[in-house]
Image (cartoon, rainbow, N blue to C red):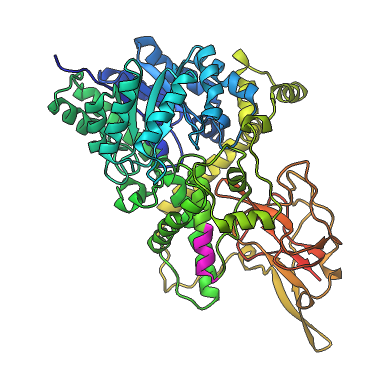
Amino acid sequence: MKKEIKLCLVYRDMWQSSGKYMPRVDQLVRVAQPIIDMGCFSRVETNGGGFEQICLLYGENPNTAVREWTQPFNDVGIQTQMLERGLNGIRMSPVGADVRQLMFKVKKKQGTDIARSFDGLNNPQNLALSFQYAREGGMVAQAALSITHSPLHTVDYYIKLADQYIELGAEEICIKDMAGVGRPVSIGKMVKGIKERHPDILIQYHSHSTPGFSVASSLEAARAGADIIDVGMEPLSWGTGHADLLTIHAMLRDAGFSLPDINTEAYMATRSLTQEFIDDFLGYYINPQNRYMNSLLIGPGLPGGMMGSLMADLEKNLASLNKWLAKNGKDKMTQEQLLLKLFAEVEYAWPKLGYPPLVTPFSQYVKNVALMNAIQLIKGKDRWSMIDENTWGMLLGRSGQLLGELGEDIKALATAQDREFYTGTPQDLYPNALPDYRQKMKEKGWETGTDDEELLEYAMHPGQYEAYKSGAAKAQFQQDLAKRKSAKQAPATPVSTPTTPPAAIAQPKEMTITVDGKAYKVAVSYETENTPTTGAPQEPTSPTTSSPPASNLKSIYAPLEGKFLLTKDSAEKPIKIGDVLKIGDTVAYIESMKVINAITADQAGVVVDILGRHGEDIEEDDVIVRLK
């Protein structure tokens, strides 16, 4: 008798591995029935990860979206699954245990059957609560082994890790090969080793196709005893996504496995709708580079799930870097040149950062540090000068113990900056938060929702939820989409045709004036009484006209573009005029590439002017503080 093997369509991950967004709920409801009619899936990945945040960014209610999207699958007995990030829940940063517990209860009641829980550091300590809360909430607790390829991440390491997860309450195991860098034979050995120890544990194999191993790895996993294989489908298979359903289906049948037939008409309907969603608006957020496989990623091992955001970050940083290169009389770089430098720098930096598995959020941390290193080296500066606060949290043990030892240069930097390492339980650093958010909602007159689902969204995504409630999120999304559509439809301006730049662009931020025959460089402010202020208030600064001439002052410049922040939270006090800064002191922050970067003083002196405005966008090399 042929061994039966099942398939799961990772519809959520297909989109988020290709670009920034998922389809809207009205689109998801339309595509649900054709997916069901295909007749070959026992499971569908519907939500989790960034799904709820994306709904909020659209200005839509994520709870309504999950309920309506999962309902058709619930009705016919196809299991739905979500991805959750352990200590981080379904966001990028740690959250209180009570918020995590509520999440599993809410998502089960909304129609999600299986919780695929992973920890970015493969830390069993962080996932113990996920398994407990999932089972208490009525969900299946599936533990994901985050696969990466290093001297420390061996087959034996992963088999023993599965032992620990199962002992803590995991009911299923997922081999989560988020970058597709797991070598096929090693994947087979992992599955076989786990099955020999735990024959009744279901094993699901998940791999991205980016470097090209995924088809062979899927076959090795199936032969070794895997029960379910995750697949994507056209037009979003391959590239940074997943191996295609048709390929995996045909391969497994040829290998002697029993699988249901695929309803071809339903397949084409699903494919057509997915393409329709791309043509409607989602294609504006999919970088064409993400549709290609790239064996160069075998070395750096960056995951498919973050390549969409990586290419967007790269585009912004390349523009800023090329401005700097042009200003300094150097040749501009292409996106491919910067990408290759990034790949090389990830390979160099990753071991020194302790070999964290390159999965959310730690893949972003390693990528961000490597990108900043690469840019600093191009500018003739030193490595490690731009390590963001989130990455420091990882390095210092605030998310759990790293498997590898930190490089000596990182240790020395931590000592120089008086940073303390943490060896306790990570969850203890993040207290319960639901009572505070419940009180805030009461004060605002907001309902906590059915099963407290609105309370969950507010506590999990406070900034995005407030923007959703105010209508700002929908307005910003629509404005951004209109801008992208306009840019794509607008005819290119002939190079030979001179154009007059808008007045706002032409306004200088600095100028040289001559007084009594002596030249002075001064900062120019274009503030109006309507200048917005958000977040922590900025301390009043003396008028520009009363500041000493800029030529007599020292300047601290923005090392990258992003949103300028005087403080990263309400408990912190911003710098003010008259403060004495030493080299290495934190001046302010810039939010960029999903993390907050501390800006430190590279010169000492007394603050005489603060040019950066809290909450406003800032360009690389803008002056943010003047010192004397």
Magenta span includes 518: no
**Compared with residue 47, is residue 337 higher up or lower down, i.e. above or below?**
below
* Residue closer to the observer: 279 or 36: 36
Q: Is residue 137 visible?
A: no
Residue 57 horizontal/vertical position (percent): 55, 36
Q: Is residue 581 visible?
A: yes
Asked if residue 546 lies left or right of residue 40, the reply is right
* Residue closer to the observer: 163 or 464: 163
* Residue closer to the observer: 85 or 513: 85
At 54% across and 58% down in the image, what residue appears? 372
Q: Quadrant of residue 280?
A: top left
The secondary structure that most of the magenta stretch takes on is: helix
Magenta span includes 377: yes
Q: Quadrant of the C terminus?
A: bottom right
Magenta residue span: 372-380
**Compared with residue 376, is residue 252 higher up or lower down, i.e. above or below?**
above
**Compared with residue 313, is residue 380 higher up or lower down, i.e. above or below?**
below
Q: Quadrant of the N terminus?
A: top left
Residue that lies at the very extreme toward the bottom in this rendered image:
517
Residue 440 horizontal/vertical position (percent): 74, 25
